[in-house]
Every structure is written in C-alpha cells, then in structure tokens.
Amino acid sequence: MKHIRNFCIIAHIDHGKSTLADRLLDFTGTVTEREKKEQLLDSMDLERERGITIKSHAIQMEYTYKGEEYILNLIDTPGHVDFSYEVSRSIAACEGALLIVDAAQSIQAQTISNLYLALENDLEIIPVLNKVDLPSANPEEVTDDIVDLLGCDPEEVIHASGKTGFGVENILAAIIERVPAPKGNPDEPLQALIFDSVYNPFRGVETYFRVLNGTIKKGQNIKFIATGKNYFADEIGTLKLKQFPRQEIKAGDVGYVITGIKEAKEVKVGDTLTDAKNPTTNIIEGFEDVKPMVFAGIYPVDTEDYEELRNSMEKLQLNDASLVFAPESSAALGFGFRCGFLGMLHMEIIQERLEREFDMTVITTVPNVSYHAFTRKYPDVPVIVNNPTDLPDPSGLDRVEEPFIKATIITKSDFVGNVMSLCIEKRGMVLNQTYLTTERVEMTFDMPLAEIVFDFYDRLKTVSKGYASFDYHPIGMKTSKLVRVDILLNAQPVDALSALIHADNAHTIGKKMCEKLKELIPRQQFDIPIQAAIGAKIISRETIKALRKDVTAKCYGGDISRKRKLLEKQKKGKKRMRQVGNVEIPQEAFMAVLKLN
Ligand code: GDP
Ligand code: MG
C-alpha cells in the first residue's frame, strides 16, 4: 500500500487538464503508440467534440521512481458545474490533487471551487503552473497568485506544459513524494466508495470504486448499501486503457466491478460497497441522490413517434442515471415527457444524444427550475412544480419558493461595475467582493437558479468581454414573487411557452417574448396575433403579418439551383417545426425566452 498513490487533477475548464493527463500516460508508458489519440480520457464522441469531460474515469499507471515501483491511480473529474457532485465523489476517492492553473489565465472560478472541495477532503494539493510555453504566459505573476491562494512556497509550484511535456517528470516525482500513501486495513470488512459508473450495453454497468478498507474478491457476494441490493462480483479488475481482470483488490487501491446490473440507476455514485455477509458498519459519508435541477418537456416532432421516443428515453436512462422523465401531455404539443436534467449542458447533451443515437427529432420546451408552491389550504405542504402549467390557481396560492444558488464570479476590476449590474438585473444579491490582486476581483452573490437558466452565461461573457469565470452551488429554496406568463398564438394559449417570471419583470419579459416570437415564427398565409398574458389579463401584443408572395418568387427566372437550395433549406428547417393549431412553431421559438436581450 505504501507504493500506491491516488490523485485527481482539478482545474478551471480549458486550463489543460486532459492534455496534461495524456502526457502523464505517455510518460509512464501506460499508453502504447497505437492507442494514442488526442485527449484519451474523453472517450465519448460527444465529449471529444465539445472538448469537455462529461463522465469521470479512472486510469492506473505504473512508474518506477528512485528504483521503486509505484502504482499511480489517476481519477479524472468532469469539468462542468452540471456534474459537480461527481467531481466531489472523485475527489473523495483520492489523497492528493494536481491543481492546474493556466499561466496566461491565472486562477478562475472553478479553480477555487474545486480547490475548496479538495481541501474539504483533506487532499494534498500540488500546484501546477501549466502552459508555460505560451507567449502570453505570465509565470511570475500567476505563481504569486497561486502562492497567495494556497499559502504555499513559490518553489512548490511546478512549471509545466501539457503541450511540450515540460515538467511532467517533476509532476510525477511530486505525486510520489508529496501525496500520502493510502491508509486502510485490508483485513477489515469491505468498505469501498463508488465514485463513478459506466454503462456498457454488452456487459451491463461497470462500477468504479476506491477500496478504503477490506479487500474485494472475484466472486464475492457484495452489497450496495444505498439500494440495499446484493450482487456477485462476476469480474473485478484494474483500469488502464483496457480493463485488466484481477482476483482481488485491496484497501488503498482503485478498480472496477461488473455484477450483471443492467440499469445505471441501480448504481449510485457516492454509495458504499461492502461485503453482503460481513457488512461494514462504516458507511462512507456524503452520499447524495443526484437531484435534477432543470426541467423541460421533450416532445416528438411527429406525434406518431411518441412510443419510439419513450423507448429511446428508457434506453438513455439505462446509461445515464441522472436523467429522469415522466409522461406529460400538453394541450399544444400532445404527448411527451417532462424531463429532469442536472443543468443546461446536460439537457443539450440528452437532446443531442436522442438525435444522434436514436435518430429522434424532438422539440424541447422552455426549461425551468423546480418550484415549490404552497396553497392557502395547506400552507405547509409544498406542491412540486416542475412545469409552469402545474402552478396552482393564483386565487388559492399562498406563496411560491424557488431554488437559490451561491455564485462566485472572478473578473477583471474594469468589469466589476458591469458584472454587478448584470447580477442585480438577474435578481442577485451581492454578498462579498474581494480583490485577489489589484486587477482581479472575486465576487459572490445569492441568485435565483432560474436566472442562470435564462441566458446568464452569454450575458456575463458579453459584459466582461470574456474575462469572467463563473461557478455556483445550490443553497436552498426562498420565497419569490412569481407569476405565470402565458403566451397565446392566434388567440390560443400555447402551454409549452408558459414561464414563471418574477412579478416585477413580467411585463418587460412578456413584451420581449412577443417581439422575439414575432421574429422567429415564420409568416404564414394569415395574420397571427401573439399575446402575452397573466391570467386573463393581456400584457403585450404583436402581430405576424400574413405572407403575400411565394417565397421562391424572388428567385424566379434566376438560377434554378439557388431556388432548389432555398426549397431544401425550407424542408430542413421544417423538420424541427411543430404545428400548433394552424401555426407552425420552430424549435428556436420554444427557447426564445432564454435569449431575450
Ligand atoms: P481541460 O478543459 O482542462 O481538459 O483542457 P484541455 O486539456 O482540453 O486543454 C484546453 C486547450 O488548451 C486545448 O486547446 C489544448 O490544446 C490547450 N493546451 C493544453 N495544455 C497546453 C499547454 O501546456 N500549452 C499550450 N500552448 N496549450 C495547451
Ligand atoms: Mg478536458
């Protein structure tokens, strides 16, 4: 055990975590030339394309240092706030963390939030100043920033480049010298932390664990404490790029187990694995059931595809336990599903996977957070509102609570004013403002989660010219003055366009929604009135004027291929249109409320 090191890499997004992980794998010879691909750990196509790590993974390296052989378990963590619970579990499986900081960007919001998670778990922090090869790198200043943040010596900061491989040997030496060897007793009852699971359509769910105490053996009858279920460990092993089956894995080490479980939701990240016959009395702390934060309706474009959509969603859920869904019906869209996601990125990923892997064309409705409504009749019993149309009638409503977050933003001092105005506009309350250096400021706010769903990122980017990083975590429910704004097209309410909005902003937002929908909904053969309403009261109105000429008329006599192109373009655009009454609504219109300026 004294020759094992368990570590993770934490960083703000794009600071070079995946690239540096690749260099570590190269240097230790874990990856053969043939297996080499860019950013090896990001194995899902989607991850590779988006340049993000969605699911965390573990990989084992062997490395000889000062004549002794070591096993280094690198536990990869996802880089997006939607998956922060998984980050916290991966961190809990380690004794040390490489804290990567981009030498040009310095410390950013996720650097800090991940660092706090690592410190809460008593991890040894090894600061790495990455991308020192960049001409824009600022090694002295950024080293000072790191020293200020950690209270460490400048000599402890390792200079490195994931691009050139500079510094990689020093990083490996630091992992061995500075990260403590795991503790734990291989003879005690089994106690292992599940930090990840991966769905394999052929073999079932692969569960990744870190053994804290005891030993897991092939064939052992093991128990998942959260679900209370027992399974046989059909196969256990360690992970390199491939799986290496083993007979046993002892306290201190990391591995996988395959038990024949067929559904991802049977395996819960953060749960404790133990021996069924001789269970541990030590349950690993911090287990949480992951809760969806954002909800939206998903409907088939073609109403006939409902059953097929259900099948596809069920299959997706097999390998993504954080996706939840329940059937719902909409007066406007017919039968579909109300789905819960970890965040907006997760929602986009699900929509994209439905289209790519299942060839479904779907309409996603306006996303919303989960509200608690209290009626006068039962003022202590919350009605969970995951769809604005489920809000109880205002006449009997006592109050509505919405989820709040604590947000951290790091920006340049020049943009403090802009960021502050944006946060206040988004119903945020400034809690704190700290100058990290004379140029860089950290601000913390309380803010409704719903405002993050509504185009916060884009706005933040704009007002800070890209020089702001952002991170948040939920802090609970608070009462807010919310009203439901409904949209009527051609005098018909379109329930899928309803949203809960703060009463003070309802008029402005209702007006902007009408304007935006007017832009997005194509003109048709008749006038289409668009109205926003609160209850029976119309608060805004626009009209889409009837189309007078054939759209192809302007190409008439012109280039025939241009005309064909235009028709094809229309056909393609049609795919993502939904007929509601006699109005055709494009997908963008359902998201319009998210992009109001
Ligand atoms: P992650 O989001 O932290 O995993 O970051 P990536 O490893 O995906 O890197 C983000 C970007 O920075 C990519 O375009 C990399 O090619 C680039 N990058 C990573 N490390 C270095 C480095 O040391 N030097 C330079 N010049 N670019 C780097
Ligand atoms: Mg990455």
Image: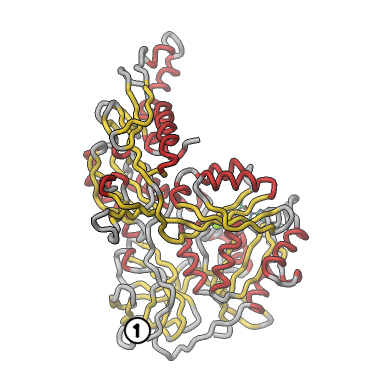
Residue lying furthest bottom: 187
- Whether 216 is drawn above or below 76: the answer is below
Which quarter of the frame holds ligand 2?
bottom right
Q: In the image shown, does 533 or 10 lie closer to the viewer?
A: 533
Q: Please state, as top left, top right, bottom left or bottom right, where the N terminus lies in the image.
A: bottom right
For this orientation, the residue located farthest to the top is 557
Q: Residue visible at 63% across and 56% down?
A: 433
Relative to 453, is 258 on the left or the right? Answer: left
Q: Quadrant of residue 193?
A: bottom left
Residue 211: percent from the left, percent from the top? 45, 80
Some atom of ligand 2 lies within 8 Å of the CB belonging to the residue at label 1: no
Residue position marked by numbered label 1 in the rendering? 275
x and y percent of residue 473 in the render?
A: 49, 60
Q: Is residue 233 above or below residue 113?
A: below
In the rendered image, residue 172, in percent from the top left (x then y), is placed at 65, 72
**Farthest right residue?**
140
Residue lying at 23% horizontally and 44% vertically, measured from the top left: 329
- Image: 241 above or below 331: below
User: In which quadrant of the rendered view does residue 264 lie?
Assistant: bottom left
- Estimate how packed mark 1 is, as few (under 14), some (14 to 19) or many (20 or more) residues with alpha carbons within 10 Å: many
Along the horizontal axis of the image, is 65 left or right of 2? right
Q: Quick one: SS at disc 1?
A: strand
Please give left or right for residue 201 compared with residue 214 in the image.
left
Closest to the observer, 207 or 189: 189
| Place of residue 567 in the rendered image (x, y in percent of width and height, measured from the top left) | 38, 22
Q: Is residue 365 visible?
A: no
Amino acid identity at mark 1: Asp
Give the side of residue 449 with respect to residue 71, left or right. left
Identify which residue, 555 or 543, lies in the foreground: 543
Let me know if residue 254 appears in the view. Answer: yes
